């Protein structure tokens, strides 16, 4: 199947987008038209006016029948990497279709303003023990990954992966893959089935020999919405992505998730029930952080709940949010293979004013660490509708650091256990910062605690002389409360806030 961009620039042929061609054809000759983000926007806008057609056809049955192990045995040959023989700082490798990855992803290279389709080549892949192929050049790919020399020693490190629906992952220096970003989330956490948009085509700009960044364009499609995306990826100690998104709606959606992040939380120090595992903690992220438009910083520890939990944090002019791996202590994980202490945090920083909306946190019960059970995203108050267009630009950080001001105390641990009598529960929260460490143990530091229901008492604030942190402990008496109880706490010295605001949703 020919690239959408190729067809837009001339030589229009039949295919699943035949109805799109008339809408996107331009009068200019191919040599006069330069590919740009506007090109992808025009394609997405025109595609939104046509019925949705999923491009998962043309997958041979032998690839569709592959299980996990057989699919993993298919590897791209590093010697075939795009630009490997040209001495460029970035290289691209491709993923095969098969197993769960059925959608055909078209990939193009843009050079001197002109797009060129990359056809599938069977010889680029080592099929291991599989007896497969050869396959048609029309097969396409299921995604790609990027390599860049982070250590400047000639070795090209893997820095990012785009594969599966609209999912992508990235790492900076010294990090290992953990949580994922997504292009868009639709109706996540609703009773009806979630809709998973797909990046069906990419265009990768060829970098210069001195390039420190690479530009990628993506065409997103789903039954409800199409989207044009532009990613500017900058590798380094932390990896940043500048993301521009333009959305075009076939029809409205109930829950639109912008800049979604997907992660895993199986077990932490706040887990209140037995999980039979030698590792004390198992998670890619341990909290949701939010920088509110008012300047307040929120911290919500994650959990592996027994029932679906959905938390909503409304705000205006939000400064940022992210799923954070705050605990970097190997002793707390004891996993030599997973290296959870090196999993990146992901921070979303709006570029421009997103107006009013809410950060959604969805926590799904999970019985195994292989499942991503945590989702966070921004949902705008403005309503989507048929024919409507929306734009969201943001910078996404994959980092081992946090954006929290260093002088503001952060909640380093949340622990929960039995109170003095049933059904009371005791909460212990440790806050730490350079400022808090300077306070004498006799300093007058007070806790501000609120509960949506039940009763809070036995409040104690004291300095931990072993670590320099300050510990807040209290008991919650849920009384007759049936619904989850929302807890909120922070430390103050007079009117001065010394810590971020700790939030927690507790249920029986």
Image (cartoon, helix red, strand yellow):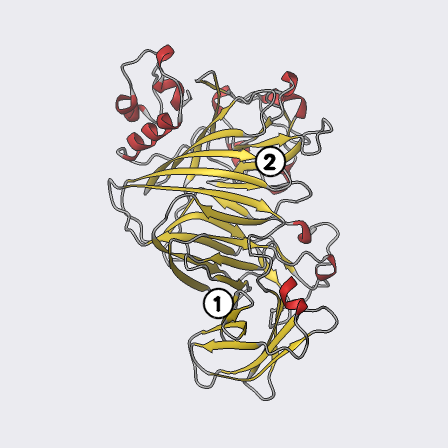
Q: Is residue 116 left or right of residue 152?
A: left
In this rendering, the answer to whether 64 lies above or below 450 is: above
In this rendering, the answer to whether 468 lies above or below 76 is: below
Percent position of residue 193, x then y: 38, 52
Local crowd size for mark 1, using a 10 Å CA cut-off: few (<14), some (14–19), many (≥20)? few
Quarter-of-image position of residue 229: top left
* Residue 235 circle label: 2
CA gap, disc 1 and disc 2:
38 Å
Q: Is 22 in front, or is 90? A: 90
* Residue 307 circle label: 1
Quarter-of-image position of residue 160: top right
* Residue 149 circle label: none
- Look at 72% across and 68% down and name the residue there: 467
Callout 2 secondary element: loop
Q: Is 63 in front, or is 14? A: 14
Local crowd size for mark 2, using a 10 Å CA cut-off: few (<14), some (14–19), many (≥20)? many
């Amino acid at each position: 199947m020919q690239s959408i961009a190729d067809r837009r620039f001339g030589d229009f042929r039949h295919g699943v987008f035949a109805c799109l061609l008339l809408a996107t054809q331009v009068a200019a000759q191919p040599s006069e038209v330069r590919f740009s983000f506007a090109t992808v926007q025009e394609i997405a806008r025109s595609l939104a006016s046509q019925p949705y057609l999923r491009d998962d056809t043309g997958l041979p049955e032998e690839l569709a029948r592959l299980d996990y192990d057989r699919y993993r045995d298919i590897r791209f040959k590093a010697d075939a990497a795009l630009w490997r023989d040209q001495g460029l700082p970035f290289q691209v490798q491709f993923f095969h279709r098969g197993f769960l990855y059925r959608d055909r992803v078209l990939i193009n290279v843009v050079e001197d303003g002109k797009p060129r389709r990359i056809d599938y080549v069977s010889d680029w892949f080592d099929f291991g023990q599989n007896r497969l192929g050869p396959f048609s050049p029309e097969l396409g790919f299921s995604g790609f990954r990027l390599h860049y020399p982070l250590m400047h020693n000639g070795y090209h490190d893997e820095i990012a992966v785009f594969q599966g629906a609209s999912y992508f992952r990235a790492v900076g220096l010294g990090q290992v893959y953990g949580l994922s970003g997504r292009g868009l989330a639709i109706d996540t956490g609703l009773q009806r089935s979630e809709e998973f948009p797909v990046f069906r085509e990419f265009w990768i700009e060829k970098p210069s020999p001195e390039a420190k960044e690479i530009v990628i364009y993506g065409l997103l499609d789903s039954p409800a919405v199409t989207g044009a995306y532009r990613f500017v990826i900058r590798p380094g100690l932390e990896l940043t992505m500048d993301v521009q998104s333009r959305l075009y709606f076939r029809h409205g959606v109930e829950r639109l998730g912008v800049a979604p992040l997907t992660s895993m939380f199986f077990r932490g120090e706040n887990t209140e029930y037995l999980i039979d595992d030698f590792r004390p903690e198992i998670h890619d992220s341990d909290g949701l952080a939010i920088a509110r438009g008012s300047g307040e910083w929120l911290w919500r520890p994650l959990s592996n709940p027994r029932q679906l939990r959905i938390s909503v944090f409304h705000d205006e002019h939000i400064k940022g949010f992210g799923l954070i791996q705050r605990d970097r202590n190997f002793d707390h994980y004891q996993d030599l293979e997973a290296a959870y202490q090196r999993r990146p945090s992901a921070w979303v920083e709006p570029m421009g004013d997103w107006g009013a909306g809410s950060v959604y946190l969805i926590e799904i019960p999970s019985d195994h660490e292989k499942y991503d059970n945590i989702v966070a995203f921004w949902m705008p108050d403005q309503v989507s509708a048929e024919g409507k267009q929306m734009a969201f630009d943001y910078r996404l950080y994959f980092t081992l650091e946090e954006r929290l001001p260093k002088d503001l105390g952060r909640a380093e641990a949340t622990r929960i256990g039995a109170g003095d009598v049933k059904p009371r529960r005791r909460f212990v929260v440790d806050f730490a910062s350079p400022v808090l460490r300077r306070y004498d143990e006799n300093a007058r530091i007070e806790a501000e605690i609120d509960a949506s229901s039940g009763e809070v008492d036995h409040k104690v604030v004291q300095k931990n002389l072993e670590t320099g942190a300050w510990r807040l402990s209290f008991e919650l008496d849920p009384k007759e409360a049936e619904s989850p109880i929302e807890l909120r706490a922070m430390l103050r010295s007079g009117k001065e806030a010394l810590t971020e605001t700790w939030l927690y949703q507790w249920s029986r």
